[in-house]
Image (spheres, rainbow, N blue to C red):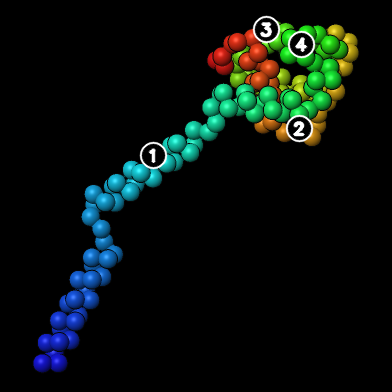
Amino acid sequence: MKRVILLMTGICLVALIMVSCGGSKKEEAKEEEAYDDYEIAESEGPSSEELIAEGKTLVDGSDCKTCHHPTNKIIGPSHTDVAKKYDFTEENVKLLAGKIIAGGSGVWGEIMMNPHPTLSQTDAEKMARYVLSLDGEKEQ
């Protein structure tokens, strides 16, 4: 009798382990599919509009307004004039971000634009995207 009880207990334990450790293939596939969707959505990153909005916030919080205005020339060109001069491409975003960080002169006259060496490349690119959006052009 003890053998039968031990055998039945052993069978129940093995069955319980098999049921709890394994799942159906369909359930595993659904879990993987849901995870894949999450990864894809997460890796897309912010939209162009979100980057432009972040750039506007960065420009508004910086010293840019000392020399630049969205539509009027002050010391430097208006941001809209900059947008009209450069196509809204990834290459020009990087070019203008570099100018924001390094400063410089000669393109718009001899008055030097102050460098912003503590600004990250990512933030400078967001600012450049905002400026390039001011003429209504969409990023290419």
Mark 1 highlights which residue?
37
Whether pointer 4 and pointer 2 mark residues with C-beta atoms closer than 8 Å, the reply is no
Dot 3 amino acid type: Lys
In space, the residues marked 1 and 2 are separated at their CA atoms by: 34 Å
Mark 3 highlights which residue?
84
- Residue 48: quadrant of the picture: top right
Sequence-wise, which precedes: disc 4 or disc 1? 1
In space, the residues marked 4 and 3 are separated at their CA atoms by: 10 Å
Sequence-wise, which precedes: disc 2 or disc 3? 3
Mark 2 highlights which residue?
119
Q: Is residue 66 left or right of residue 47?
A: right
Q: Is residue 46 above or below residue 1?
A: above
In space, the residues marked 1 and 3 are separated at their CA atoms by: 39 Å
Sequence-wise, which precedes: disc 4 or disc 3? 4
Whether pointer 4 and pointer 1 mark residues with C-beta atoms closer than 8 Å, the reply is no
Q: Is residue 47 left or right of residue 121?
A: left
> Circle 3: is it few (<14), some (14-19), or many (20+) Cα within 10 Å?
some
Mark 4 highlights which residue?
78
In space, the residues marked 4 and 1 are separated at their CA atoms by: 43 Å
- Residue 12: quadrant of the picture: bottom left
Q: Position of residue 7 (x, y in %)?
A: 15, 83
- Outermost residue on the bottom side: it is 1
Q: Is residue 57 above or below residue 20?
A: above
Q: Is residue 118 visible?
A: yes
Quadrant where the N terminus sits is bottom left
Dot 4 amino acid type: Ser
Sequence-wise, which precedes: disc 4 or disc 2? 4
